Image: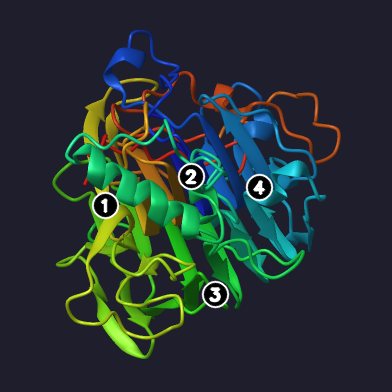
């Protein structure tokens, strides 16, 4: 069977913003798989990826182990160019010390969608000249983000408050349509700023989502003991650490999403289906608005909707109604008539997993899983009578996690490995499109796609019906 044969990867993305989710065909390295995969977003922008990859079967020797921390990136219809400024370490040869440093992206026009503070990373890739991957921890990558704000506008919605001649809700009569149009005219701003809520004061913009405290991610691939066997299992781990998330911070509608329990995803392949495992510690989140708990998000209660509406009886209101609060921060009076035009949907604990026996490039068992700390979607309701609206207007994903492991039947045999032939070494940390190292490994499956070379982690979601 050979010694030192192991494949595994783990990736953890701090934040991904998707516009027009589920609108573009998904690309795949497997012929014919595109038609079976869920569609991707039209545009994706992200910050902070910690990715750890191990592939003993890689064609280029220095691609056997890759640990990479990427500052940010963008994918358009699923295609992602390589991210400049990535912090990376490859092996062999092994590295006695990790590499650390700042990986902060420059300011760009995309700051309207997402803006990050100080971003640091650390990477460590190890390989033994005599034992190959049998070194314990093989690849280890982490990123730490000081602050983050995302979406100070919803570009998929109109910016003007006057929707005369445009608004036509299918379930409303002409008089009701006109009442909504008049109500929108009274708001401070257009729907793209949630009626002026995201406009802020002066040049300061309010973000839909922000993280005032440090957010960190770590991805690790290592070999671990198999009970009762001299061989090793491949273990891939993705972890997140975050204290709290703020929605509409600094406004009367501010919501706090407090992280009670942190998520951990661990995938272990022993080479055999019966003993390979996926262990997931689902996050527990508490949603609070105005000092009142709106509910708890966990594996048993994975979804919470916060409605966005306009009052139909009080034209003096200059801001919409979000959750149970008016624009002055007061609770919604009993009997006040309103119409919900949209929903902020928070969801958590979206674990997906799949495993299968494989014979190429060696006989064994591959297992993988994806999960997310928190999804925030902006969804239209049937009452939002605008033409050609998608099922979701925008989506922010925090803590996207992917972990996969592939070991030979019976586990990884550790012993003296054949010496590697001389190979050209990479010039600095700029990596090639390293997915090429996995072309011989059928580790991608329907419903799960991961772009390990950039910051964008694509955990494809099923299309949701409009609420």
Cα–Cα span, label 2 and label 4: 27 Å
Secondary element under disc 4, as helix, strand or loop, is strand
Classify residue 409 by image quadrant: top left
As drawn, the label of residue 351 is 1
**In this rendering, which labeled residue sits more in front, label 3 or label 2?**
3
Earlier in the chain: of badge 3 and badge 4, it is 4
Task: Using a 10 Å C-alpha cutoff, classify the residue at mark 2 as few (fewer than 14 neighbours), some (14 to 19) or many (20 or more).
Answer: some
Q: Is residue 100 left or right of residue 237?
A: right
User: Can you tell which quarter of the image residue 290 is in?
Assistant: bottom left
In the rendered image, which residue does mark 4 sit on? 68
Asked whether 409 or 367 is in front, the reply is: 367
Question: Gap in Å between the C-alphas at discs 3 and 2?
Answer: 56 Å
Front of the two marks 3 and 4 = 3
Dot 2 or dot 4: first in sequence order is: 4
Q: Residue at x 31, y 88 (%)?
A: 292
Give the spatial CA distance, label 3 vs label 1. 29 Å
Q: CA distance from mark 3 to mark 4?
A: 32 Å
Helix, strand or loop under label 1: loop
Secondary-structure class at tag 2: loop
Q: What coloring was used for the rendering?
A: rainbow
- Name the residue beneath numbered marker 3: 249
């Amino acid at each position: 069977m050979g010694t030192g044969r192991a494949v595994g990867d783990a990736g953890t993305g701090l934040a991904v913003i998707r516009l027009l989710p589920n609108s573009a065909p998904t690309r795949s390295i497997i012929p014919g798989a595109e038609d079976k995969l869920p569609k991707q977003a039209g545009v994706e922008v992200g910050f902070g990826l910690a990715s750890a990859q191990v592939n003993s079967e890689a064609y280029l020797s220095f691609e056997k182990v890759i640990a990479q921390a990427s500052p940010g990136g963008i994918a358009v219809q699923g295609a992602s160019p390589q991210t400049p400024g990535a912090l990376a370490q490859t092996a062999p040869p092994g590295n006695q010390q990790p590499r650390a440093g700042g990986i902060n992206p420059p300011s760009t026009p995309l700051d309207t969608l997402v803006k990050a503070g100080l971003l640091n990373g650390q990477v460590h890739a190890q390989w033994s000249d005599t034992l190959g991957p049998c070194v314990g921890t093989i690849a280890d990558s982490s990123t730490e983000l000081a602050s983050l704000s995302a979406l100070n506008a919803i570009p998929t919605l109109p910016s003007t408050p006057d929707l005369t001649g445009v608004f036509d809700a299918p379930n409303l009569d002409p008089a009701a349509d006109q009442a909504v149009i008049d109500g929108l005219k009274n708001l401070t701003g257009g729907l793209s700023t949630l009626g002026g809520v995201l406009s802020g004061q002066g040049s300061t913009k309010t973000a839909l989502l922000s993280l005032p405290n440090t957010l960190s991610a770590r991805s690790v691939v290592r070999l671990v003991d198999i009970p009762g066997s001299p061989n090793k299992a491949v273990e891939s781990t993705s972890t997140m650490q975050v204290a709290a998330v703020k929605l509409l911070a600094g406004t009367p509608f501010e919501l706090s999403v407090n992280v009670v329990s942190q998520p951990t995803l661990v995938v272990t392949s022993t080479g055999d289906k019966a003993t390979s495992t996926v262990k997931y510690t689902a996050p527990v989140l508490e949603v609070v608005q105005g000092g009142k708990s709106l509910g708890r998000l966990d594996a048993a209660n994975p979804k919470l909707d916060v409605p966005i509406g306009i009052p139909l009886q009080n034209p003096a209101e200059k801001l919409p109604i979000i959750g149970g609060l008016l624009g002055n921060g007061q609770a919604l009076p009993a009997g006040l008539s309103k119409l919900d035009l949209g929903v902020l949907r928070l969801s958590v604990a979206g674990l997906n997993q799949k495993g299968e026996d494989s014979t190429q490039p060696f006989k064994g068992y591959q297992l993988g899983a994806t999960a997310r700390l928190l999804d925030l979607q902006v969804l239209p309701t049937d009452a939002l009578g605008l033409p050609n609206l998608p099922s979701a207007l925008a989506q922010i994903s925090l803590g996207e996690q992917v972990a996969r492991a592939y070991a030979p039947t019976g586990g990884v045999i550790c012993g003296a490995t054949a010496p590697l032939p001389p190979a050209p070494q990479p010039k600095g940390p700029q990596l090639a499109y390293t997915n090429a190292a996995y072309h011989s490994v059928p580790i991608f499956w329907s419903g799960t796609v991961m772009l390990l070379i950039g910051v964008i982690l694509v955990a494809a979601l099923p299309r949701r019906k409009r609420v």
